[in-house]
Amino acid sequence: MCLAIPGQIVEIAEKEPLARVNVGGVTRNVNVGLLDDGAVAPGDWILIHVGFALSKIDEGQAHDQLRMLRAMGEDGLAIEEVRGYRFAEPSQ
Amino acid sequence: MKYVDEFRDAGIISGVAREIARTAKPSRLYRIMEVCGGHTHSIYRHGLRDVLPANIELVHGPGCPVCVLPTGRVDDGLAIAARENVILTCFGDMMRVPGTKGTPLELKARGADIRMVYSPLDALRIAASNPEKHVCFFAIGFETTAPSTALTILRAQELGVNNFSVFCNHVTIVPAMRAILDSPDMRIDGFVGPGHVSSITGCRPYEFIARDYGKPVVVSGFEPLDILESILLILRQLDAGEARVENQYKRIVPWEGNPPALMALARVFELRPYFEWRGLGFISQSALSIKPDFAGFDAEKLFNVPGVRVTDPRGAQCGEVLKGVLKPPQCKLFGTECNPEHPVGALMVSSEGACAAYYRYAMHASAVEA
Ligand code: SF4
């Protein structure tokens, strides 16, 4: 559960501290309330933990982190976790 | 997105390993604790033990959230789940942690409404869409996770979701490190400091360890190269007779931490006078509780939890393993009664738990192709 998952921001919500991110082809909204206001923009990379952005990272770091998750055999779990974030998805 | 499978750094890694071997004095023994369970996992996964000289012992620390949660608190959470009209939500790892009467997963199979979530915000959403039920989130984790719970409580207040509460078991890593340093049966020469926890707390909270205890702390990333570099930095400090806090994980960890996250923590939580840790016993000011301003979201205020202290199952030596006094295979139940399919103790549940990591990798050395 201490997995930190790298994702790339696709879109920033206007009213709430939410960002739409892409993690290995899965897109979900995550909360960016733990980052400074205006700290991230579309195209930026972030580290995600339990539905929240923990920190902004650069693209190289994002790829390093992905490689590490892969090496630890946790990349599948990471995608599963992101897929499980339902809190800001339209209800089915 | 492309995953790169091979090890980019194989050459550099053997270089650092050689440097470690050169720096370590053969005449002495080095006991280095990796505090964080993520590091423990990486060390076993990549077989790092095998590239270190024999006189460097890696001691596994308490930084695994489900591992340090005492059985009594699991029972308390499950007592909440047993109440009428309550939905208990928790992270996946927590689902398999044994309480006295079974794991959350087993209680669910017996009819309790217990649901796995990946984010505390998902627990809040379940509350918003089930107004006739009470939804409690079983919160565990260190400073990496606690700010997310804090923001979720603030969000619940903002949205006026009144059927939501948090059973707060958040703990803080520094008092546990102090308890280890104060423990007479533990001799640690230096710490590989936690990575993601430090991205929130920054490096300052570790300064007393260098100043008052004279031990080096190197905050470290999780890749094999990160961990080996951190070990080398610790050895160099020891060799020079120094003790400082160093930051090997600058790419993620700012020295001052994450101010918005620290502010969220300060708004919602306060320190408990003391809290029980599995293996380490009661440690003062080592855990967070919800401030009275948010009492309406505090499951411990809303429900009478039993609060009974429970000892580990017979034969289980989780406490000794957590303290680094025993290695996982030295526990009498390891690999027999206690295995990842049927964990007796919490250290066998999570991939960050020393017993699970040892079982998965060290027992099947051929699976480690690093
Ligand atoms: S093998 Fe099981 S019972 Fe023994 S210390 Fe590890 S988790 Fe605890």
Image (cartoon, coloured by chain):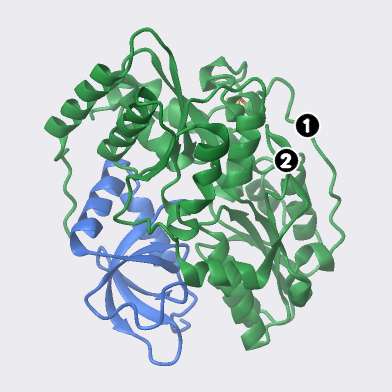
Task: Name the residue: 31% across, 77% down.
Answer: A40
Question: Distance from label 1 to label 2 (Cα)?
Answer: 7 Å
**Can residue B229 be seen in this snapshot?**
yes
The image shows residue A79 at horizontal and vertical percentages of 34, 59
Please indicate whether residue B68 sits to the left or right of residue A10 in the image. right
Please indicate whether residue B46 sits to the left or right of residue A90 in the image. left
**Residue that carries the numbered disc 1 in the rendered image:** B311
The image shows residue B227 at horizontal and vertical percentages of 33, 36
Q: Which chain: green?
A: B
Amino acid marked by disc 2: Thr
Find residue B71 and name its label.
2
Query: Does the residue at mark 1 contact the one at mark 2 (Cβ under 8 Å)?
Result: yes
Image region (quadrant) for ligand 1: top right
Chain under callout 2 = B
Total tally of numbered discs in the picture: 2
Task: Name the residue: 66% across, 50% down.
Answer: B104
